[in-house]
Image (cartoon, grey):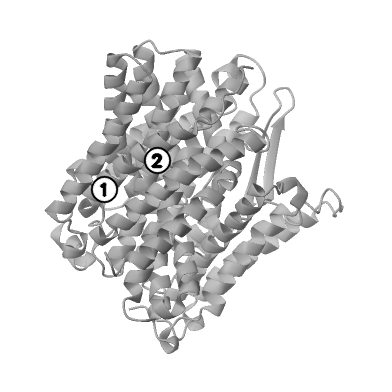
Amino acid sequence: MKKDLFPLIFGVAISTVLAGALVIAGLKAGITPGVSPLVILVAWGLFAKRAAGPGGVRFLNISQVAGSAGMAVTAGVIFTAPVVQILYADRGMPVPPVDILTLMVLSVAGALIGFGFVGLATQKFLSDPTLPAPEARACETMIEAAVAESARRPRLGRSLFAGLAASFVSPLLVKIGLAGESVSLFSRSEPTSGRSFSLGLPFSPIFIGIGGLLTLATALLVFGGSFLRLIGDWLLAGVPAGEMALRFPENSMRWVGGGAMTVAVIYSLAKFARAKIPQEALARIGDPGLIEVDPARKRGQLRAVALGFGILILWLLTTRAGVGFIAAMGATVLVMALLMTALGALLSLQIGSSASPVSGTIFVTTLALCLVAYLLGHRRLEDVLLLTPLLVGACVAVCTANDSSQDYKTLQLCGMRVQDGFRAQLLGLLGGCLVVPLVLYVAHEAYTLGSDQLVAPQGKMFATLIEGLLLEHHLPWWPILLGLGVGLLAVLMEILGHRKGVPLPSMALAVGIYLPASLGVGILLGALFRWHAERKLDRQGHESILSAAGLITGAAIFELVLGVLILFGLTEESLRIFGTGVRLPPLLPEILAGVGILVLGGILWLNSRPQGNPGREDG
């Protein structure tokens, strides 16, 4: 404990700052970036001598685990807590304030449950060598660069630092209005219904950076799902007003994605539960002792789950709900948290925590909680005040799994025992549980959750589900049934592919349908840039990983700076210099966005070329 005291203090401090500062940015964008590479970069920059000295690997790893944990609470709270304010505002009723104490209590409960479940399942999900764990490998490479002798380091200027600079400048150009958010390829609109559809290449360093860390096969699977969504959105844009529009509302593809995700989730969990990793695969993961958890630590993880569940039940008792409701909802949250944290950990290791479809897993959880509440007769608007905090706890648990799996994988890759990070993960989570509800309260008082200034897209989506099922007793069954059918087809494809030795994971397809189409396109772009340069190599090189990590980290730094400035009163409208105060030629922002995409991809491509990396080490 003594040797880890300083990195623990530093990690918890930076975790608290990041968790609070990125609340508003996350509410506006609807996505929270993975900050593990950012934490390593800050620790490396502030304490370079300590990082390069004896114990530097452990210092950076512990700092990273503690420093990134708070963002799990940020994502869990901002995705679900605004449901209350959104539903009350939509019905023209007085909007209740953010209940700071309730959110703190349920965030702690969810964090403990997620922390405990992931710790108990660590050995199983980290023993699968087929999971790419993109952000963990980026963190491993950054740590290796930090502790290596200067003569053995990869070329940081053209890889990590170039990525940092480009990914910080890119969103800045978009915010000031000089560059567009994407390059438009196609658009369609239906004048009678007002529906519209557009397809573009996103000018997004985070998406391109994530793609640069994934294999082309994984990126293609995710894009395949997003391509289905593109087709669906294109068809929906042509639906005129009338009976067909009532059957297929404008947000139908979200329901299709939710249906497909439900089937894929059930199948993936069943497969995970019965899966056994072959001995030859286990031999490829290195020292198996790194992922073993001592019996005493396992008992500690079980106590964390029990404590979290106890806090949840005690909160339900304070609401004076009936015993039947308390027992049923408590059991539902516990079961769904167990299932969804396992799935969240696997998805994060598959495509990274920044792109992991938390919304999909929480969609399934929301559906389960709504059905239980409906069957128990809790179908009023006031019941949302009971349901939403439970959703917050469940979502924090899933987001904890997303973050923990990447952090624990980094420990494993760096040769450290995974259980050595448990304390750091828990302390970082608790710091986020204290600060995030406070910042959410300030954000609501300043901008109003769900308004045009603070869109909270996930909150609106879950509010739509709760309103349709619980309050209005109506759901768009045609898109849901279509999604269930797509999910079944995806599962059949996976089964047939497995028989022929071709990996076609159904979850990847469901992920793509559920994610925004721009994310799938951006991931594919990044993967294609890297693949074109590395197609003759056996594995990804250090400078390639560092450049992708830089693209993710620089954008996270920008969101952090923007979040802090917004807390001090800056508005995004005041940043938009071009297009309002200064008129630009109509096509210039889109042209600059296209140039920006080429620059971001070019950084990946340059650092992935074998002849461009003479000093890198691939061993």
Which one is closest to the eye, mark 2 or mark 1? 2
Q: Which amino acid does label 1 sit on?
A: His
Q: Which residue is drawn at 26% across and 70% down?
A: 415
Quadrant of the rendered image containing residue 285: bottom left
Number of other residues with Cα within 10 Å of mark 2, as a class: few under 14, some 14 to 19, many 20 or more: many
In the image, residue 561 sits, relative to residue 227, either above or below, namely below
What residue is disc 2 on?
396
Residue 398 seen in the figure: yes
- Residue 166 horizontal/vertical position (percent): 62, 67
Between the C-alphas of marks 2 and 1, the distance is 33 Å
Residue nearer the viewer, 367 or 322: 322
- Residue 190 horizontal/vertical position (percent): 71, 28
Q: In this view, does 316 lie to the left or right of 596?
A: left
Secondary structure type for disc 2: helix
Q: Residue at x 57, y 60 (%)?
A: 557
- Residue 432 horizontal/vertical position (percent): 44, 47
Q: Which amino acid does label 2 sit on?
A: Val
What residue is disc 1 on?
498
